[in-house]
Amino acid sequence: MELQENPVALGTAAARPRLEVTALSKTYGSGPNAKCVIEDLTFTVTTGEVVCIVGPSGVGKTTLLKCLAGLQPATSGTAAIDGRRIDGPPPEMALVFQDYSRSLMPWLTVRKNVRLPLRHLRLPAQEMNQRIDDALRAVGLDGSDGKYPWQLSGGMQQRVAIARALAYRPEILIMDEPFASVDAQTRFELEDLCLKIRDDFGMTILVVTHDIDEAVYLSDRVVVLGAKPARVLDVIGIDLPAPRDQISTRSLPEFAEQRTTVLSMIRKPA
Ligand SMILES: Nc1ncnc2c1ncn2[C@@H]1O[C@H](COP(=O)(O)OP(=O)(O)OP(=O)(O)O)[C@@H](O)[C@H]1O
C-alpha cells in the first residue's frame, strides 16, 4: 500500500506535534441554559504517535472530536494541525466511528463503500481502484470487495470502515471507540491492525476508548479526562517495548503498573 512514506520509520523527520489542542473549551447554549462540556483542554499528538483519550462515559468525547474534525467551532481555545487552525474538515484527517452498522451503506458492496469518500477527490479511475485495492489489502479484506456489509462479521465490517478511511490516505486518523462493538478476539486483531497502520504508514492516530487496557496497549501516551466539564487530568507516557504483542505485552509487570496508574487517575475523586 502506498499511503505515504513513514517519516518516523525512515528517520527523516524529527518527531513534532502534528495535532495541537490548546485551551480548548466548548459550551453549548448561552445565558442560564449554558452548559460547559469541555474546559481548557490542552494536549498534543506527535507525528506517528498513537494517543488514546480515556475518561468516564458521557465525558464529552464526541464534542471534542467534532471540534477536532472541524464540524463545530470551539467556544474558546484552538485545535490546529501543523500550526494551522482547524476551522473546517481538515483534508489530511479521516474518522472511524464505533458503529460500523450505521457508517456502512448496506446496499453498497464493500468496494463501493470504500470508494464513497473518494468520489469528491475526482481521481483518475486507475488511481481510485489502486487506492481501494491497497486499503482492502491493508486490512486483510482483499477478495471480499464484492460482498455486502451484511454478509460480513462485525469485525470484518469494522475493517471495511477502517479501509474506507485508509483509502482516503489520511495523515491523521481519529477513531471514536472503534473496537467497542466487536468480540474480544476481533478487538485484539483490530488493535494490532491499528498499530500496524501506524508502523507501516507513520500515521498519526488519536483514539477515544473507555477501555483502559486497550488504551495502555495501543498508546504512546494516554490523555486522561475528568468529567463535568471534561478537562485533562494527566497525560501519561506509556513506556512499553515495541513491537507490542497481545500476550507478552499484556503479561509484563510494566503493563499492569501503567494500567493501575491510568485507572487510579480516572477513579480519583475530583
Ligand atoms: N449540540 C448539543 N447541544 C447541547 N448539549 C449537547 C450537544 N451535544 C452534546 N451535548 C451535551 O454534552 C454532553 C457530552 O456529550 P458528548 O456526546 O460529547 O459526550 P460523549 O462522551 O460522546 O458521550 P458517550 O460516552 O455517551 O458517547 C452531554 O451532556 C450532552 O447532552
Image (cartoon, rainbow, N blue to C red):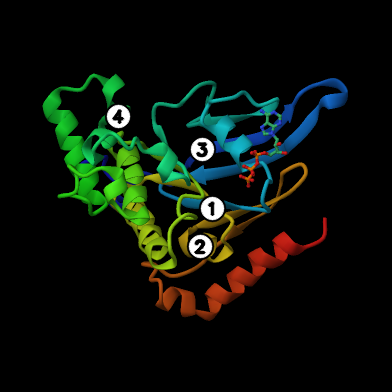
Q: Circle 4 sits on which residue?
A: 116
Tell me the kind of residue under disc 1: Cys
User: Disc 4, disc 3: CB below 8 Å?
Assistant: no
Where residue 201 appears, as percent x and y from the top left, is: 30, 47
Tell me how far mark 2 sits from mark 4, CA to CA: 30 Å
Depth check, mark 1 against mark 2: the one in front is 2
Tell me the kind of residue under disc 4: Leu
Specify which label sits upstream in the sequence, 1 or 3: 3
Q: Circle 1 sits on which residue?
A: 52
Res. 19 mark: 3
| Neighbour tally class for label 3: few under 14, some 14-19, many 20 plus, Cα within 10 Å | many
Q: Circle 2 sits on which residue?
A: 214
Q: Quadrant of the N terminus?
A: top left
**Vertical order, 169 against 206 (above or below):** above
Tell me the kind of residue under disc 3: Leu
Tell me how far mark 1 sits from mark 2, CA to CA: 9 Å
User: Disc 1, disc 2: CB below 8 Å?
Assistant: yes
Where residue 200 appears, as percent x and y from the top left, is: 28, 52
User: Can you see residue 97?
Assistant: yes
Q: Residue at x 43, y 58 (%)?
A: 182
Tell me how far mark 2 sits from mark 3, CA to CA: 22 Å
